[in-house]
Image: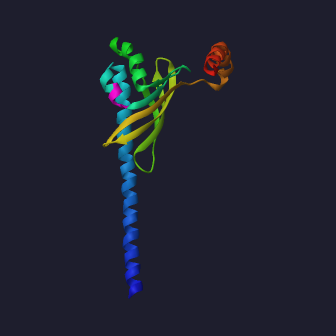
Amino acid sequence: MKKIIYLFVFIILFSNCESNITFKKSDTTAEKVLIKNVLDAWHDSAAEANFETYFEAMTNESIFIGTDASENWKNNEFKEFSKPYFEKGKAWSFTSVERNIYIYKDGKVAWFDELLETHMGICRGSGVLTKSENFWKIEHYVLSLTIPNDNIDEVIKINKERDSLFLSTLKQ
């Protein structure tokens, strides 16, 4: 009789685990849609010069890394740098043309990469979001220019002198 009870309990537990896994998969899909919406609205708010909305999408501790080697902005520094652009009525316009979103198993951390159509041509963005109080916020964002492999030698030549000066400053 004990064996039948143990078997019955095992079957119930196993079926419950299976339904939780299915729920997690659909939950992940819904979370990816929420993250996509946060990122799209964030990019839109820059194009519309909506300073408050743009920075509300980021945590107070967020980091924005720009295309220049010197651009590693903490949130307040990035706000200060960006404000004049937003005040002109249009900060920048980035449109995602491809995006991959990944969610950590705890459901509170996500990371992504995206290809962007920008005034600089195709760029790549990547970053990390965290979920707090049921809202996703950008914690870290990296913007990079894409360089065709066939043109890398030209870019190295263009950057050589400036990179050398920048590195010497960092090493001091």
Question: What is the total number of numbered labels drawn onto the structure image?
Answer: 0
Residue at the (32%, 29%) spot, across then down: 56
The quarter of the image holding the C terminus is top right
Q: Which residues are magenta?
A: 54-59
Residue at the (42%, 21%) spot, across then down: 77
| 80 shown above or below 58 | above
| 10 shown above or below 40 | below
Residue 96: within the magenta? no
The image quadrant that residue 168 belongs to is top right
| 23 shown above or below 124 | below
Residue 38 screen position, x and y as percent: 35, 34
Residue 100 at least partly seen: no
Horizontally, residue 93 falls left or right of residue 148, namely left
Residue 41 screen position, x and y as percent: 34, 29
Horizontally, residue 149 falls left or right of residue 24, namely right
Residue 55: within the magenta? yes
The quarter of the image holding the N terminus is bottom left
Residue 137 at least partly seen: yes
Residue 48 screen position, x and y as percent: 32, 20
Which of these two is toward me, 121 or 81? 81
Q: How is the image coloured?
A: rainbow
